[in-house]
Amino acid sequence: MGKSSKDKRDAYYRLAKEQGWRARSAFKLLQLDEEFDLFANVSRVVDLCAAPGSWSQVLSRVLIKGEKFGRTAWQDREAQLRRQMLGVFPEALGEADVERNLRPPREEEEEETSRPRGNVKIVAIDLQPISPLAGITMLRADITHPATVPLLLSALDPGYDAATAGAQASHPVDLVLSDGAPDVTGLHDLDIYVQSQLLFAALNLALCVLRPGGKFVAKIFRGRNVDVLYAQLKIFFEKVVVAKPRSSRASSVEAFVVCLNFRPPVGFRASLEEPLGVGRRMDMMVKEREMQLLVVAEAAMQNTATGTWDCTRPVSNLGDDRVTEMEVYDETYDENDDVRGNARNTRWIAPFIACGDLSAFDSDASYQLPEDHVSLDPVQPPIAPPYKRAIEMRASQSKASR
């Protein structure tokens, strides 16, 4: 967690230390889970760019220790509230319904849900060293280097043989997470580009280890042309949503792209020799996926200025009641472009939603501390922080000046 005064005023910074999390980013994953139920039917996970280990800590406490956070904790609170309300108004339901809803959970059920699981496999990767966590395999490696993929596959499956298996996992994983971000420069276009390349590196690893139907969650910087990246992710996943957790500062351009139901194109096989994001391979895959998409009927849209109806903008609702996915055509399109061989410009707009309870803390607000507040130390100080060398140089300079 940060050391600046802004971080210390942040409610999530203090709340993370009170609840025993290594960093405030743990709340981002928990709020994403509340919305998308990321941990449902998940037992094998890869956590990329994991330092200082807050997301791995969430995985350890939820999947291995069986603690309840995120979606599961919210459902338990709803069930408890429902029992309280039915206790006040028992006449609202029949006798059988009242007995079923008012009955407290049995001890066997509580033990079953909170019992530690032994079939969970979690691998965390980062360039920085990470303090050990229960049940987590730590790897110190660079996710942008091709040699990291065989190292990851060996950690997932001890019997992995690169000569026979290639770049594919013999036992694929259910979920791949990436909370990594480059050191920002303040030049937004450059930061967005570097972040997109980091996301491509995480996606290349995910394609090698994800099972069909798996999930992929990664941090992304929203920019002017970031919708192109969303459309590229749509090639491999049935549903792509951009989410902004409440614990993520509204003043930050960061968001999280949540990709659900991994479904690679027919005949696709992950290749370390031709990684995604390099060369023309991605453009060829985009064209192949467009040929496989369903044809959507045109929907008439009324022009409010002229009162006429425009039927040139097909709109498709893919089953989500809250958002509508649209294909937006370029207004400067000329019919003669088809004759000249120029394709119509099409942009796919990803759904954008906010995660987290509205009653939760606002990450951009400052809250008054109670009088008996005691400042706590970080749960896990960094082992080898990037600023460690600068501190040592400053200390040596101060000694020399005395």
Image (spheres, grey):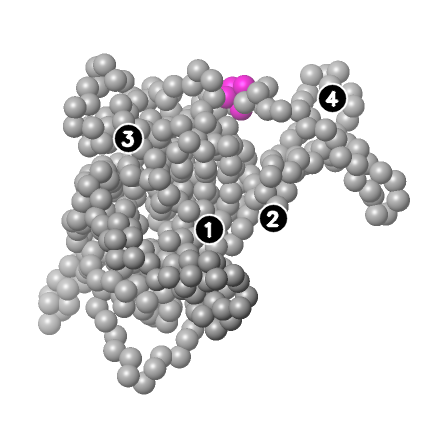
User: Is any atom of residue 128 visible in this view?
Assistant: no
Above or below residue 103? Residue 320 is above
Q: Earlier in the sequence, mark 2 or mark 1?
A: 1
Above or below residue 352? Residue 76 is below
Observer-nearest of 284 and 216: 216
| Type of amino acid under label 1 | Glu
**Residue wearing tag 1:** 35
**Residue wearing tag 3:** 145
Tell me if residue 248 is in the magenta stretch: no
Mark 2 and mark 1: Cα distance apart in space = 13 Å
Q: Earlier in the sequence, mark 4 or mark 2?
A: 2
| Type of amino acid under label 4 | Asp
| Type of amino acid under label 3 | His
**SS for dot 1:** helix
Tell me if residue 286 is in the magenta stretch: yes
Observer-nearest of 248 and 120: 120
Mark 3 and mark 4: Cα distance apart in space = 42 Å
Q: Residues within 10 Å of mark 2 (few under 14, many from 20)?
A: few
Q: Give x and y (percent) for residue 297.
A: 72, 28
Is label 1 or label 3 in front?
A: 1
Disc marking residue 337: 4
Q: Residues within 10 Å of mark 1 (few under 14, many from 20)?
A: some
Q: Residue furthest bottom?
A: 371
Q: Residue at x 64, y 38 (%)?
A: 317
**Residue wearing tag 2:** 322
Quadrant of the image for the N terminus?
Answer: bottom left
**SS for dot 2:** loop
**SS for dot 3:** loop
| Type of amino acid under label 2 | Arg
Is label 4 or label 2 in front?
A: 2
